[in-house]
Image: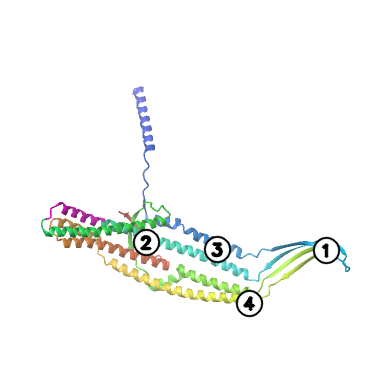
Amino acid sequence: MHPRLTSRRSSAAALLLLLSIAFLCTAPARAADPTVKLDALVIEVTSRHPELAFYEAEIAAAKAGARSAATWADPELSLSAGHKRVRDFSGALAGEGTAWSVSLTQAFEWPGRLAIRKALANGQISLAELGLARFRTALESRARTLAYGLHAAHTRAATVREVADRFTALKETFLAREPAGLTPLLETRVIEAAELSLQRRAAEAELALHAALLELNQLRGAAIDAPLVLAAPALTFGDAPATDALLTAARENNFDFRQKRAELEQQGFAVSLAQNERRPAISVSPFFSQDKADTRESVIGLGFSIPLAVSGRARSAVDVAAARRRQAETAALVAQRELERDVLTSAHVFATKLAEIRHWAPDTTGKFRDAAALADRHYRLGAVPIATYIALQTSYLDAVEAILATQQEALAAGLRLRQLTGLDFNAVSLVNATPAP
């Protein structure tokens, strides 16, 4: 090949490469895909929620308190200085000078007191950790409920818009004609009234969708108006364990009930501490003092001090701690009864909704959608009366809303039951399916 031709081709290739690079550099950046998978959304919510910092700070404070609870009180250093003047028996000045003293006081607790305080401090750590775990579990359940609620709101809004568009198109068709007779005029008014009602339902569906989106954005720490398209979750439900198994698991795993039991244990330690504090602490004070006047006097010694329990405060503290313990026992008993009632109620709701869902025929929504579309086509052909047409359209909407509401109620009951018992028995599985409309 001729060298000049080869050089021209190389120059053209280099120019094409430079133009491609310039185009890529000046091309506008493609917007980020707002579609989020359910598991990623839950992780984002449970890791970035601002209220988590409150519980983490509570744990840090409890741990700091535990470090100081098992240590002795700091020693106390005392200094004193003054002027000394000495006179003889006749009143004549014998001498004058300075007088000063220094002492170091250390209080020694009664045996066992530090151990009780350390147990109390460790109990505070356990309570703070239980609070964090409870908040994370509730936050995860709320995120999953809102995620499905966002999907349900999308579906409901799309269905309402679909039917509303049919009525709008039909009304425009009627208005484009000259109404011949009373019946077409009345049918037009019926269509207009149905359209107004559907527009209201469409606005309500849009508001519900907007509210769910705002709460999800707040939970995940995103901008309040950030776009979010959730991959539509598909629900699968499993049977709950037997009632006895649920109640046993709830007594062992429920965060609220565990907190009440931990508080009862704390009050037991508080009673032990109050009883121990009836024996006063002993303070030991080594000291040194020196006087300089007509002579120099130095004194070194060891002092002891002990408070005298003459006011009855120690006994009162024991009575108060014992009363608080009785309150904690009552609170634990009430919490157990409320827990059992909540477990049984949630299990009954979940079983009822699950039985209702399992009675549905496969593709129930699709059958109603096809029937509504078929009625729209045949009404335009004059083969279907207006009453049947409106009944099918509204039945389609009612069926979709009933199915979504039942699924949401079953989801809420299943997640609530899992939160109460701590059992992951696959009551509700939310898996990513197709993107939500």
Which of the two labelled residues, at mark 2 and mark 3, occupies the earlier sequence position?
3
Foreground mark, 4 or 3, reads 4
- Whether residue 44 sits left or right of residue 395 in the image: it is right
Left or right: where 180 falls relative to 243: left
Q: Is residue 376 above or below residue 316?
A: above
The residue at 57%/61% (across/down) is 64
Disc count in the image? 4
For residue 145, the mark is 2
> Up-down: is 376 above or below 357?
above
Quarter where residue 301 is shown: bottom right
Q: Is disc 3 placed on a helix, strand or loop?
A: helix
* Residue 193 against residue 251 in the figure, above or below: above
Estimate how packed mark 3 is, as few (under 14), some (14 to 19) or many (20 or more) residues with alpha carbons within 10 Å: many
Mark 1 secondary-structure assignment = strand
Q: Position of residue 191 (x, y in %)?
A: 19, 58
How far across and how far down the image is residue 223, in percent?
A: 41, 52
Could you tell me if the residues under marks 2 and 1 are in contact, i.e. CB atoms within 8 Å? no
Q: Secondary structure at mark 4?
A: loop
- Residue named by callout 3: 62
Give the magenta range. 161-179
Circle 4 residue: 312
Q: Using the image, tell me which numbered label, if any, was put on residue 400.
A: none
Q: From the image, give the main secondary structure of the stretch colored magenta.
A: helix
Q: Nearer the viewer, mark 4 or mark 2?
A: 4
| Amino acid at dot 4 | Gly
Q: Is residue 44 visible?
A: yes
Q: Dot 1 corresponds to which residue?
A: 85
Q: Find out whether residue 162 is within the magenta segment.
A: yes
